[in-house]
Image (cartoon, rainbow, N blue to C red):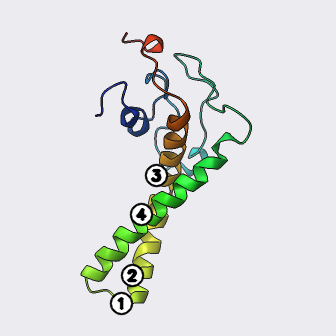
């Protein structure tokens, strides 16, 4: 499941969706806020152009929305089980979503490009 060739490998390892070798984001640390969404123009291995068309990653907003709703649901359930009040749950959700926002934004871009670009074993270094 997390081996080269699997979509999850490219998503969670920050790799090119086509060859799974080149890095997708310029900065590997997601908490470097200045560069949190900066991507390489092309893959260093297979030269895939990451920005497939102008404004390509606008579609990733929908994935970010879905991830945020899923996390908020789980957090609200946890808050409810911990006995927090409604306001306490809202504060808990706000804090966790703020901390996880760089991860959510990055994951959504990686998921979105992996929907359209598929792994090509012939482009991978480890043929």
116, above or below 87, in the image? above
List the residue tagged with mark 4: 70
Badge 1: few (under 14), some or many (20 or more) residues near its Cα, within 10 Å?
few
Report the residue that reaches farthest toward the right: 54
Q: Quadrant of the C terminus?
A: top left
Residues packed near mark 3 inside 10 Å, few (<14), some (14 to 19) or many (20 plus): some
Residue where numbered disc 3 is placed? 103
Q: Secondary structure at mark 1?
A: loop
Residue 125's mark?
none
The answer to the question of whether label 1 and label 2 lie on touching residues, with beta carbons closer than 8 A, is yes
The one nearer the camera, 35 or 66, is: 66
Q: Circle 4 — which element?
A: helix
Mark toward the start of the polypeptide (2 vs 4): 4
25 is higher (above) or lower (below) than 119: below
Does residue 67 appear to the left or right of 49 in the view shown? Answer: left
Q: Nearer the viewer, residue 92 or 67?
A: 67
Estimate the spatial distance between the alpha carbons at disc 1 and disc 2, rounded to whole Å.
6 Å
Q: Which mark identifies residue 85?
A: 1
Comparing labels 4 and 1, the label whose residue is closer to the camera: 4
Residue plotted at (46% across, 51% down): 103
Residue 123, can we see it? yes
Q: How many marks?
A: 4
Query: Of tags 2 and 4, which is closer to the observer?
Result: 4
Left or right: 59 as drawn, with respect to 122: right
**N-term mark: 1 or 3:** 1
Q: CA distance from mark 1 to mark 3?
A: 27 Å
């Amino acid at each position: 499941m997390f081996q080269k060739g699997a979509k999850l490998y490219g998503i969670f390892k920050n790799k090119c969706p086509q060859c799974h070798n080149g890095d997708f984001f310029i900065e590997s640390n997601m908490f470097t806020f200045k560069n949190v969404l900066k991507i390489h123009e092309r893959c260093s291995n297979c030269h895939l152009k990451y920005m497939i068309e102008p404004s390509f990653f606008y579609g990733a907003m929908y994935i970010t929305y879905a991830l945020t709703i899923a996390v908020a649901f789980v957090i609200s359930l946890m808050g409810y089980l911990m006995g927090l009040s409604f306001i306490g749950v809202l504060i808990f959700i706000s804090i966790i979503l703020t901390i996880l926002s760089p991860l959510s934004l990055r994951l959504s871009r990686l998921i979105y490009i992996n929907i359209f670009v598929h792994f090509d074993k012939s482009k991978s270094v480890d043929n």
